[in-house]
Amino acid sequence: MDSLEVNKVIAAILVAGIAFMLSGFIGEILVHPRELAHPAIKIASLPAEATGGQPAPQKAAPILPLLAAADPAGGKIADTQCVICHSFGNGEPAKIGPNLYGVVGGPRAHMAGFDYSAGLKKLGGTWTYENLNQWLWDPHSVVPDTRMTFPGLKNNKQRADVIAYLRSLSPTPVPLPSPEEVKAAEAAKPAPAAAEQKPGAPAAAPQANFAELVAAANPDKGKADANTLCSICHSFGKGEPAKIGPNLYGIIGAPRAHEAGFDYSAGLKKLGGTWTYDELNQWLTDPRAVVPDTKMLVPGIASEKERAAVVAYLRTLADTPEPLPKP
């Protein structure tokens, strides 16, 4: 290519660049864009349900009306349900959780030197009767990042008994609520919603049986729940040794008290039978309703869907999983 051809190529590039700049300059002169005072399309905000907003956390029933009749001896179930993580004697060292001596009326994060979660340390305040009531009902509703694995004690009388027992763990127990405080708590208690059905409205659909819920459940979700609720006491792998509770591999379809050599409670050994889907559902709902002398620490799983997911995971822990009902 001679020098004349090179000059032509360079000239063409320069002309194209000048033309591009001139066209932009002329466009700015002819068109004057300006920002709109209001959006051209208004989008209404969606309700919380549509945006996936979380509902307000539920609250436990007021405990003050129950404390006067509470039984500290009945609250000693804490010695079986909580002792794995907590100590109770004055001056005893912490375990996985802090020592609970003097907790009623004491500050939250009360034990010096214990590594509490950031959320509990930030919360501040004291362990009043009602604060303990909400905590024992559902710890995660108070401090979402709590390290407490206990899912909560939903039975109102049992919570009152446990709080009465914790109250006794002090040289000077906090006074019980006065009649005026009890009356105020009773007045603040919301009335239960009436179950009404409008005339002509169809009857509620019957609930699916539990095995069908297991068939539709997500075993991975159940595994996560089981690791949170159960792994401190149970092992899951084939051939793994028992912990505080028995190994759960192959439990579905197995006889109750299935692990050879494990020291089951007398009530469970006497009960007999096998762990069917429905039997496990009843057990996970409230172990003490099935076997009052059980050594099981977890008081039960309130949500049937969560129980179905846990059982769906337990079903996978087998060489040949138990059959599920067909859809």
Image: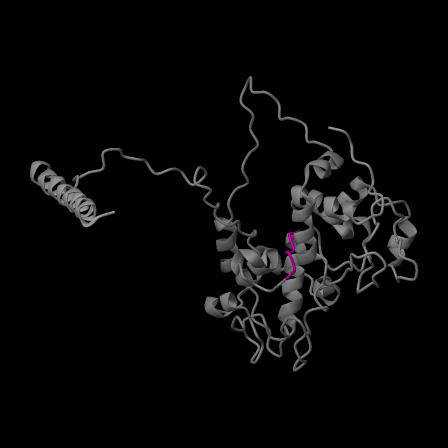
Residue at far left of view:
29
The image's colour scheme reads one colour
Residue at far bottom of view:
91
| Count of residue discs | 0
Q: Which of 99 and 234 is in front in this view?
A: 234
> Residue 103: x and y, percent?
59, 72
Q: Nearer the viewer, residue 100 or 224?
A: 224
> Residue 70: x and y, percent?
66, 60
The reply to whether residue 113 is in sight is yes
> Residue 156: x and y, percent?
64, 53
Q: Which of 246 and 327 is in front in this view?
A: 327
> Residue 94: x and y, percent?
65, 76
Say whether residue 101 is left or right of residue 5.
Answer: right
The residue depicted at 65 percent of the width and 55 percent of the height is 153
Say whether residue 133 is left or right of residue 230.
Answer: left
Q: Would you identify the image quadrant in which residue 76 lies?
A: bottom right
Name the dominant secondary structure of the magenta segment: loop
Which range of residues does the magenta coloring cover?
Answer: 149-155
Say whether residue 26 is left or right of residue 114.
Answer: left
Residue at far front of view:
2
Residue 124, above or below 187: below
The residue depicted at 19 percent of the width and 50 percent of the height is 3
Q: Does the magenta stretch include residue 151?
A: yes
The residue depicted at 64 percent of the width and 52 percent of the height is 154
Residue 114, above or below 265: below
Q: Does the magenta stretch include residue 28?
A: no
Q: Which of 44 and 153 is in front in this view?
A: 44
Say whether residue 25 is left or right of residue 41.
Answer: left
**Quadrant of the drawing holding the C terminus:** top right
The reply to whether residue 64 is in sight is no
